[in-house]
Amino acid sequence: MNQYHSSQLYNAMLENMQDGFLHCRAIDDSEGKLLDFEIIEINKSLRELIQIQEDIRHKKFSEVLSMNSGIFFYFAKLTEKLTYIKAEESFEFNNSSMNKWHSVSIFPELDKHYLILVKDITKQKIYSDQERYYNAAARDITKRKSIEEQLRESEERWQFALEGSEAGVWDWNIETSEQIYSRGWKRMLGYEEHEIQPNIQEWISRVHPDDIEHGKQLTRDYLNGVIPAYNNEHRLRCKDGSYKWILSRAKIVKWSPDGKPLRMTGTHTDITELKSLVEELTELTNDYEIVFNGTQDALFLVSVDDDGKLRYNRLNSSHERLTGLKTKQVKGKTPQEVVGKKQGRKIEANYKRCVRKKGVIRYEEQMELPTGNKIWYTRLSPVIRDGRVAYIVGSSRDITEQKSMEDYKKKVNDEIRILNESIAYENLKTEFFSNLSHELRTPLNVILCSVQLTNLLIDNSGNQKLKESITRYMQIMKQNSFRLLRLVNNIIDITKIDSGYAGLTLENTDIVGLAKDIVMSIEAYVQNKSIKLSFNSQIKQRIIAIDMDKIERIILNLLSNAVKFTEAEGEIDVKLFEKNDSVFISIKDNGIGIPEDKQEVIFDRFVQIDKSLTRRQEGSGIGLALVKTMVELHKGKISVKSKLGQGSEFIVSLPIYSIDDKEIVDYSQSKADRDMRELISMEFSDIYS
């Protein structure tokens, strides 16, 4: 039976018990001084007995004492007893405010918990008091007759209560062996009223054979005064042949003048489910011990005090074997007391993290132990009680050899990776210089040819068309000059980055206005290509620290790529938005797209998607690598989403922060210091009309 089912049985048992049940816990201050008691559980029978309707679970005795006079009397008496009790104790007291007699049994448990069973014995006390009163009758016959009448009425009330009670009540006349059983006693075993006769043999004949001798000896000891109270757990056979566990409690209610017991009254409580639950809990405990000490992992239990102090409680046998530490050495001690302050503080930091999180945490740690230096993989699980972490259950595994193998494997893999990277880098350099040769030779040849043609036209023609031709060829020379300048600039920037001299000149400026101005500055150029360009921003303004020159180059480079690979009548959409303390710039087109197998390498240096000699657009393959580096210098990120034939989207994220000691720079004013037309011409120089 699982723990959840056991808990259900336990709760059902408590609510159906005819005796009152109370589970409470002592509350101490940090110095161990008793402050109060907390109510953990209270069943229905006790709530009815002390006449309380509201739920008082998790309340303190001091809070309950103020509710009403009857409850005040009960909990005041209980507080008085619990303050000094050390062992099991039973007592009776008269709750005068409710006109009731209570029989109370207290059972101290671990960790200052108490289990309390309460029974209403008002009827028994009335009967017992009347018997004693009868023995002390005075000579006045009138008074004696009045007393006899009271006794008769009391006896009738007792008999009526006994017969009508659903509780398991019995009354034994020791001299005559006559024993009366209540209707509840009979029904508890499945019998009708007429099926049980009023004699003690009815009980003796139904006691389990293994329990009869113990029960008889217990009865003899109680009657002879050897033991102070009669409490007997035994099995009784039911009508259907099954057995029920019964808790029998009794008291001598009549004595002879020479002190011999004459009459004994008691109750029977069905504790079958309770015994079953105890057996299940015992089995669970045994299973826990088997698992706790049977695993090869090092298990440990840490208690968390009310003030948050961490103390070791228990180690399993594997833990003791692997660490050389013993439970008796560490029990009640803090990690710092066990392994020293330096290492102990690191251990406590992880334990406290588990307490704060109230959840499972995992980590690796290096430990200096009596058995040597070890690397542990540790898992901590909190045990939560009353809303706070009361214990931490930990498991550790020695992964020293595994880590050594992983380090060796990593070292080998790193060496292989470095070798492969060296080979790949040499191949890239070869390809780069091949591309560089092509990129330099082509514009130079075009410039030379254009110059020659210009000279010929000037020499051989004097008409109006000459001017137009000269203008056209001069534009070609200018565009290719920009291409060369752009290539040289990129090479210089790459060299600076490799040499560690690349840096940022940060200014506080409005990224929204900057991006919008850059997009609008190329609008005419894009329209000339019959491409639709749009700009949308979810934010009106956002001041962040950026290097405006580098952000211009980032956005223009991405826009030039979008224009380069988008057909006429296509669309380019630029968007700005915020998310998780970052500004995002999205540049999306519906152009030719990027093959899936190339998307992971397009930000690498010298990589070109189209390497054919007939490619329509030029490029060295270092533009996107440079863009990625400039974005990362801003502590940002760049990513791409693309589908072949459907277009591409490049997304740049920049962190939102500003420099406190710098003023805000207006981009629209500062851009006058830079020739945007020249910058645009240079970034778009790879695109031919």
Image (spheres, rainbow, N blue to C red):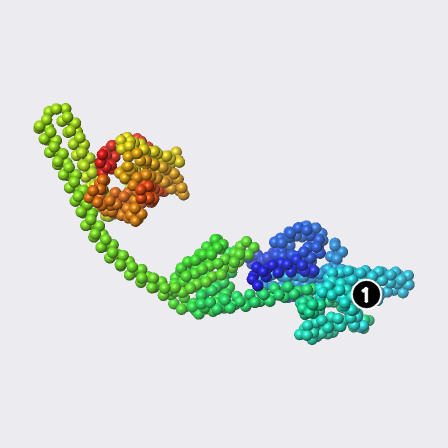
Location of residue 299 with respect to 355 vertically, above or below: below
Residue appearing at x 20%, y 42% in the figure: 614
In the depicted view, which residue is nearer to us: 297 or 529?
A: 529
Secondary structure under badge 1? helix
Between 507 and 611, the one nearer to me in the picture: 611
- Mark 1 burial class by Cα count in 10 Å: few <14, some 14-19, many 20+: few
Q: Quadrant of the C terminus?
A: top left
Q: Residue furthest right?
A: 141
Name the residue rendered at 88%, 63% in the picture: 144
Q: Quadrant of residue 547?
A: top left
Residue 233 in the figure: left or right of residue 560 = right
Which amino acid type is shown beneath numbered disc 1?
A: Arg
Measured along the vertical axis of the image, is residue 578 above or below residue 226? Answer: above
Q: Residue drawn at (68%, 64%), measured in percent from left and top? A: 270
Residue at 55% over, 66% down: 285
Residue 394 shown left or right of residue 95 in the figure = left
Residue 148 image offset from top left, x and y in percent? 87, 63
Outermost residue on the front side: it is 645
The x, y position of residue 617, in whole percent, is 23, 40
Q: Quadrant of the N terminus?
A: bottom right
Q: Position of residue 673 (x, y in %)?
A: 26, 32
- Residue 510 visible in the picture: no
Q: Percent from the top left, x then y, of residue 78? A: 67, 58
**Residue 197 visible to the viewer:** yes
Front residue of 348 and 435 = 435
Residue furthest left in the image: 459
- Return the residue at label 1: 132
Residue 405, quarter of picture: bottom left
Q: How many marks?
A: 1
Residue 213 found in image quarter = bottom right
Q: Is residue 618 left or right of residue 164?
A: left
